Amino acid sequence: EEEEEEEEDDNMSTVLRLRTKMPWKTCWRYLTSGGFFLLFLMIFSKLLKHSVIVAIDYWLATWTSKDNTNEVRNTDDKSTNKTYHVAVFSILSGAGIVLCLITSLTVEWMGLTAAKNLHHNLLNKIILGPIRFFDTTPLGLILNRFSADTNIIDQHIPPTLESLTRSTLLCLSAIGMISYATPWFLVALVPLGIAFYFIQKYFRVASKDLQELDDSTQLPLLCHFSETAEGLTTIRAFGHEARFKQRMLELTDTNNIAYLFLSAANRWLEVRTDYLGACIVLTAAITSITEGPHSGFVGLGLLYALTITNYLNWVVRNLADLEVQMGAVKKVHSFLNMESENYDGYL
């Protein structure tokens, strides 16, 4: 009995480890489906864009600090100094606008290319599939790969991936700028990072299960509605309107309960990230007291600290959404690993 209990504990720990593990291998398969060139271009453009955004804020802080610490003696020096700072700020702003456009186009281009390659490979595998595959695989499962899963790959993964990378880089930029303005913030960053890790780990598992529960309760509702609409004449002829209406209300309540729990989980995450954000703002404010007269950098650090709460919230949400959406890529790849029929020629 003790051995059986130990085996059950090992199995439970294995299941929990797999549930909390992010499907990085599936993410890598999706990213490489768009091509290594587009992947490199997307990463490079995003890093360059956020570097320019941070450079703009840094330049404004430098400009403000110089105006507060240096006394310009004559009007000519003051005018020259202002022209120089305005020119650099304009160049950085223009570069940021161009890089934002390039980054958006690159992400959409990579998402479109990845979706097209996955669809073409899936179609070729189905066309060249062996006969036993069609005997053992339901037709609805095959159609679901070309409809629901392909729609997720086309419409949902690219914006989620773009939002995740943007919020992650903004969060890292905020932490880096706060640490630069107030170096003592790095001491408090370690416990805050540990707390954030366990919060996102706990939320991702719950969010994944709740989204799957919401999807599973939505399907019977849609099926019952379509069946009722098709057989409305027969239902009225036998006088079963009340029974079908009651069944519709029960299915609607079941689906709403699942969505209610999902919304409650999102509120739970917002409260925890607000607590973390408040701790970050408090730590940045306390450590900024010991800093020197560079008021521009202190103000910039506090500004980033005030916005980091929203970034943390979106990082965890997008990470949970991407984990669920990568299930579609995993299902498609399960068909791509199928052995093809040995044909003499090629289609």
Image (cartoon, helix red, strand yellow):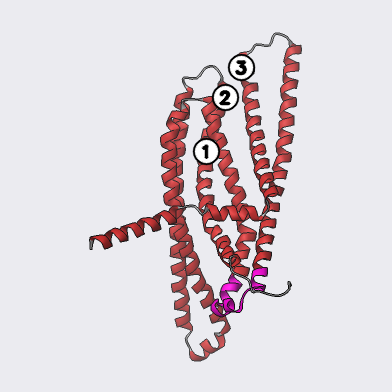
Residue 240: give x, y in percent of width and height. 47, 86
Residue annotated with mark 3? 68
Earlier sequence position, callout 2 versus callout 1: 2
140, 18: nearer the viewer: 18
- Determine whether 284 is above or below 77 in the image: below
The amino acid at mark 1 is Ile
Q: Residue at position x 68%, y 11% from top?
A: 72
Alpha-carbon span between mark 2 and mark 3: 12 Å
Task: Give the main secondary structure, helix, strand or loop, of the magenta stretch.
Answer: helix
Whether residue 264 appears in this view of the structure is: no
Q: Is residue 199 left or right of residue 63?
A: left
Alpha-carbon span between mark 2 and mark 1: 16 Å
Whether residue 240 appears in this view of the structure is: yes
Identify the image quadrant of residue 265: bottom left
Badges 3 and 1: C-beta atoms under 8 Å apart?
no
Residue annotated with mark 1? 308
Earlier sequence position, callout 3 versus callout 1: 3
Q: Is residue 46 left or right of residue 206?
A: right
